[in-house]
Image (cartoon, helix red, strand yellow):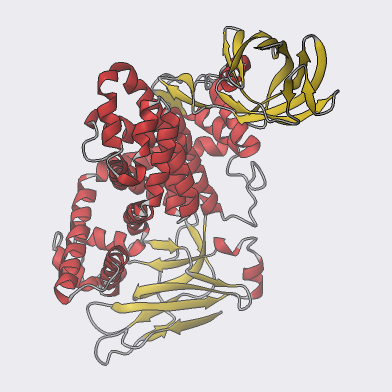
């Protein structure tokens, strides 16, 4: 097995020489933990602190049999001995052509390629997820960004309770969960669409609800919402009761300000940094030394002697890891400000980066008991998941060629979090499903349903088990009647049984376009044709009516028959209009028209039609 080092210039201080040897004395990991693959190497150089200013790439080449024993090469790990136990890390690079796996490292010790057991991988992920869920508040930064965006469009004088309701309502939407994931993956276009959808639905429903209790102040609210000139027509739409239109306009206004990308990108970046920080084995090691101290006799991550609680010395010995933290902080400044920091600003950035890390270490110390408790729950959860075969290769969509075992375990935790978010419940291990809790076996079943039947099957099972309510629906006739109301521009073709000219002193124009409107009220309604009223009788989705227009010397009557239907997001009407002059059939007019269906918003879980 070959071993290679790729080291940049200046990685060591002074004239130190880096050596790579095969140790004679070392401890094998327990069989329950992992199996080492091939030889162990000892990377070393003289001195108390054995850490690098920049990362070194350590690469191992596996023999043909070792390489081919892995269905998915991503299951190969790099192992490091910290003086107490072996630690397993995912490789930073895998080369199929040369059969090599590589890892960027910042310190000296024993290293070897390894194959961790499934039990060890479960323990690793359970621990990571426990730290992540305890230390990272994913909604904190997103909430700040959401509130600032809402304020930017609604104006500084917007009612505070209304603002609070809107921000909380947006973050409570299922779509917002997907938005957060897309932001984390930097899918900004998708995130913009999801934000407009969340914003429009919530603001429209909140406007409707507030209109019921503060109608006398709604004008003032609309005025506040229209303070930003670009979105000034929002106030007019509110005054007309078109809450959906106003909300949609404001949602588009949020995107057009270009604040969306900047604010949410910054929020996602802060959260991403927090997540990555606690997934870093190097940061975890620095934290451990800060809490427990470090004896010089142990090779723990290359650190020298450090007393517990001495953060300054930990920071000094972090070497390249601390340097990278500062590089990232400077990059964030440049992205936010669009320029390089000044010398004084850079000093401030460095000072703040160091202070933030120390503060996070102290917060982590205070939460160790919570992390240990959560880790235990995570391992118990994985036992239940294994019983349900959700971690079994080639079951429930788990293709071991495409996904590593560790990736699958992470996926199961992500789906668990999705279930808890969707049901707004805590998970229990012994109790029944209730209004506030959901049993772990129910969670496992729901995950299995999602993996086997997709989103639709999963949602149906949630409803069947009473964990979420089926979205209230409107009767199709209600939607149809609402959609038929308002003005229509009907186009068709008018044919004559007589030639153009005069008939009993009445001039007849060929092929006019007729504008008329329909409005329904309890199954009957009225119709206007060029300003002349008539009556409309409705039976189901069919309607008929007669319009009589009197002129001097003649009476023109128009007999209307037709039908209405819903489809493809539209209300469609079509039929015939027969024209009679003094009882003589003179015209046949076939007509049709389409109009988008009204939007449905939910106010206190009650569907309300709007936007027509």
Q: Quadrant of residue 275?
A: bottom left
Residue farthest along the front direction in this orientation:
505
Q: Front-most of 552 and 231?
A: 552
Q: Residue at x 44, y 83 (%)?
A: 6
Q: Is residue 50 left or right of residue 245?
A: left
> Is residue 315 shown left or right of residue 99?
left
Residue 190 location, x and y as percent? Answer: 50, 49
Q: Which is more toward the observer, 566 or 261?
A: 566
Position of 270 relative to 327 (above/below):
above
The residue under the point 55% across, 60% down is 75
Residue 380 visible in the shown view: no
Counting from the top left corner in percent of width and height, residue 47 is at: 23, 82
Numbered label tally = 0
Is any part of residue 6 visible from this angle?
Answer: yes
Residue at left offset 14%, top offset 59%: 309
The answer to which of 583 and 456 lies nearer the viewer is: 583
Work out which quarter of the rendered image holds the N terminus and state it.
bottom right
In the visual, does 430 lie left or right of 399? left
- Which percent across, then down, holds residue 473? 56, 19
> Residue 531 versus residue 81: which sits nearer the camera?
531
**Relative to residue 171, is residue 95 drawn left or right?**
right
In the depicted structure, whether residue 515 falls above or below residue 377: above
Query: Extreme bottom residue here?
Result: 15
Residue 450 percent coordinates (x, y): 59, 36
Q: Is residue 524 above or below residue 67?
A: above
């Amino acid at each position: 097995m070959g071993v290679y080092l790729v080291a940049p210039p200046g990685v060591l201080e002074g004239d130190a020489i880096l050596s790579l040897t095969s140790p004679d004395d070392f401890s094998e990991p327990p069989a329950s933990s992992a199996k080492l693959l091939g030889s162990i190497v000892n990377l070393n150089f003289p001195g108390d602190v054995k850490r690098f200013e920049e990362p070194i790439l350590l690469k191992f080449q596996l023999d043909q049999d070792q390489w081919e024993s892995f269905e998915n090469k991503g299951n190969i790990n790099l192992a490091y001995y910290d003086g107490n136990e072996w630690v397993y890390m995912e490789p930073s690079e895998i080369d199929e052509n040369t059969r090599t796996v590589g890892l960027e490292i910042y310190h000296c010790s024993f290293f070897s390629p390894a194959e961790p057991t499934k039990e060890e991988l479960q323990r690793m992920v359970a621990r990571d997820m426990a730290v992540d869920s305890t230390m990272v508040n994913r909604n904190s930064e997103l909430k700040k960004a959401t509130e600032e965006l809402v304020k930017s469009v609604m104006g500084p004088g917007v009612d505070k309770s209304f603002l609070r309701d809107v921000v909380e309502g947006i973050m409570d939407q299922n779509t917002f969960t997907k938005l957060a994931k897309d932001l984390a993956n930097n899918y900004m276009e998708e995130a913009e669409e999801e934000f407009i959808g969340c914003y429009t639905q919530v603001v429209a429903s909140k406007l409707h609800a507030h209109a019921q209790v503060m109608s006398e102040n709604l004008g003032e609210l609309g005025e506040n919402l229209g303070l930003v000139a670009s979105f000034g027509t929002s106030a007019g739409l509110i005054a007309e009761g078109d809450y959906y239109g106003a909300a949609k306009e404001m949602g588009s206004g949020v995107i057009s300000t270009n604040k969306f990308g900047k604010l949410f990108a910054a929020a996602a970046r802060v959260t991403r940094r927090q997540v990555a920080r606690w997934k870093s084995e190097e940061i975890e090691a620095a934290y451990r030394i800060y809490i427990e101290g470090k004896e010089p006799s142990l090779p723990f991550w290359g650190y020298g002697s450090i007393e517990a609680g001495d953060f300054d010395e930990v920071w000094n010995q972090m070497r390249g890891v601390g340097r990278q933290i500062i590089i990232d902080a400077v990059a964030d400044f440049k992205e936010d400000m669009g320029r390089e920091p000044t010398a004084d600003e850079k000093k401030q950035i460095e000072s703040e980066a160091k202070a933030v890390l120390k503060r996070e270490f102290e917060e982590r110390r205070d939460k160790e008991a919570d992390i240990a408790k959560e880790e235990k729950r995570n391992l118990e959860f994985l036992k239940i998941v294994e019983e349900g075969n959700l971690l079994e290769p080639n079951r429930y969509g788990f293709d071991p060629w495409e996904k590593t075992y560790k990736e699958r375990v992470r996926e199961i935790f992500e789906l668990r979090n999705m279930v808890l978010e969707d049901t707004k419940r805590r998970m229990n291990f012994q109790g029944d499903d209730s209004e506030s809790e959901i049993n772990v076996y129910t969670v496992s079943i729901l995950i299995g349903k999602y993996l086997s039947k997709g989103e639709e099957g999963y949602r149906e099972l949630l409803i069947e088990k009473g964990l979420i309510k089926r979205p209230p629906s409107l009767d199709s006739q209600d939607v149809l009647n609402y959609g038929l109301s308002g003005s229509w521009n009907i186009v068709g073709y008018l044919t004559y049984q007589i030639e153009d000219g005069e008939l009993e002193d009445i001039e007849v124009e060929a092929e006019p376009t007729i504008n008329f409107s329909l409005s329904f009220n309890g199954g009957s309604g009225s119709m206007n044709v060029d300003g002349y009223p008539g009556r409309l009788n409705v039976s189901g989705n069919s309607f008929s009516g007669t319009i009589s227009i009197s002129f001097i010397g003649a009476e023109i009557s128009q007999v209307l028959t037709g039908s209405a239907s819903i489809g493809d997001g539209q209300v469609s009407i079509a039929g015939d209009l027969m024209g009679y002059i003094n009882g003589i059939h003179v015209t046949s007019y076939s007509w049709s028209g389409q109009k988008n269906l009204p939007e449905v918003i939910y106010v206190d879980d009650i569907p309300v039609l709007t936007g027509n």
